[in-house]
Amino acid sequence: MRCGPLQRIIFGGIGLRNKSIYHWLVVASCACMAMTSIGICINCAGIFFVSVSEALEVGRGAISMTTTLNNLISGVMGPIVASKLIGKVNIRMLTGAGAVVSALCFVGMSVSNHVALFYVLSVLMGIFVTGYNNVVITYIIGNWFQEKHGFAMGITMSCSGLGGAVFNPILSAAIESFGWRNAYLLAGVFVFVIAMPGIVFVIRERPEEKNLLAYGADSISVKSTAQKAEQKVKISFFNATFLVTVAFSVLAYFVSGFNTHVSGFATSIGLSASVGALMVSAGMIGNVLFKLLLGVLSDAMGAPKACSVMLISNMIGMTIFAFLPMGGTVVPMLSALFFGGIFAVAAVGIPLVVRYVYGPRMNSVAYSYISMFACASSSAAMALYGFSFDFFGSYRVAIIASVVIAALSLTCLCFVHKVRTQDALDA
């Protein structure tokens, strides 16, 4: 089948079918999925906690359990999606169902009058959001990019932070102006409108479906990769490589769970709600910047070293949180910005470290299991931060503990290269 001049430009330029505009359209579409599945469904959840808890007359810990359930179920679903659905179900049907049901769950929350119904809808969202969140996104980007993989992942996952930075103040303003119910309804509209165009018109599982090669690949490497992909992949859960990688991921994800409490933390130390919303936005800006930086650094010096830089940044931000003064906006904004380094580790660094450890062939399966443990950690953290506030009347104890946890994650990361090398020698 012959292609016209415009098609040749879009799908492969002048014979360079492994580098085209369409590759970057896939990145843009995956970025929209990240913006909604993570940026809105997870990163914007915290701004509803205070209003909903007051309206339903329950504690913040009880309401933060909704996000805990969402993350926990999503983590459990990751290996199921990776092993049972990816490659067997049409990728557009999988991602489309995830986006549509997630949007409808927000609509359901807008009319809910009991915390139990919020829990049911959070579980339902957790099941379906896995169809278009980081597990599937990582798989699609891995298929489409051989070169600049870290950069493509950085761009894609930075949009989860961009979604938080943009939609936190929008939805916060909607809560103040129209109430939390209408704000939930607006969140559902945003999810549908932003995610669905790319899913319907652009997303494909593999570049071969568009007569393209993976970015930077040649036909020989593609054929070799396709043959290897057909081989049965098994992951050992009882070796040092897996255990150290899981420990690094679980600890990093735990610290990221504080994100949903940043606005509540701000008001708890005497800052205004508007400053709290700005702190969340600053954290999301840090999210975006550090994810892009991590992708570039990963391509240049490897994923473990790049993640180390991000963890140190987060530890600086959290340390400032612990001793934040009750006034001003500059220091809170900067501390929240540095705190955002943890999102780069969770969303971009972990999949890149898993790919570094297991290689492209085993990456998606290994990541789905590691992500399951990591999501469970983040889910527990979100609730524990809330209950910690209820118990101590302050977030300070939990924040200091988080700095220690981030340091432990960094320690585990230092051993990743060592255990990976040793396993290779043993093999």
Image: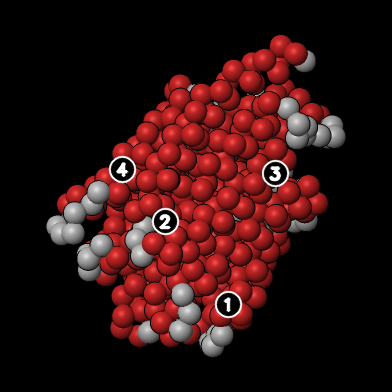
Of marks 4 and 1, which one's residue comes earlier in the chain?
1
Q: Position of residue 365 (x, y in %)?
A: 72, 40
**What residue is rendered at 50% in x and 35% in y?**
409
Quadrant of the image for the N terminus?
Answer: top right
Give the alpha-carbon distance from disc 2 to disc 1, as whole Å.
Answer: 20 Å
Farthest top residue? 425
Q: Position of residue 56 (x, y in %)?
A: 48, 85
Q: Amino acid at mark 2?
A: Asn
Q: Please identify the quarter of the rendering in which residue 67 is found.
A: bottom right
Give the alpha-carbon distance from disc 3 to disc 1, as whole Å.
Answer: 27 Å
Q: Which mark lies nearer to you, 4 or 3?
A: 4
Which residue is denoted by mark 2 in the rendering? Answer: 259
Q: Amino acid at mark 1?
A: Phe
Q: Position of residue 143 (x, y in %)?
A: 65, 39
Badge 1: few (under 14), some or many (20 or more) residues near its Cα, within 10 Å?
Answer: many
Q: Amino acid at mark 4?
A: Thr
What secondary structure is marked by label 1? helix
- Foreground pick, 288 / 330: 330
**What residue is rendered at 52% in x and 62% in y?**
383
**What residue is rendered at 49% in x and 68% in y?**
61
Give the alpha-carbon distance from disc 4 to disc 3, as whole Å.
Answer: 31 Å
Task: Answer above or below: position of 415 versus 99.
Answer: above
Disc 4 and disc 2 in contact, CB within 8 angstroms: no
Disc 4 and disc 3 in contact, CB within 8 angstroms: no
Farthest left residue? 328
Badge 4: few (under 14), some or many (20 or more) residues near its Cα, within 10 Å?
Answer: some
Give the alpha-carbon distance from disc 3 to disc 2, as whole Å.
Answer: 23 Å
Q: Which mark is residue 369?
A: 3
Q: Please identify the quarter of the rendering in which residue 177 is found.
A: bottom left
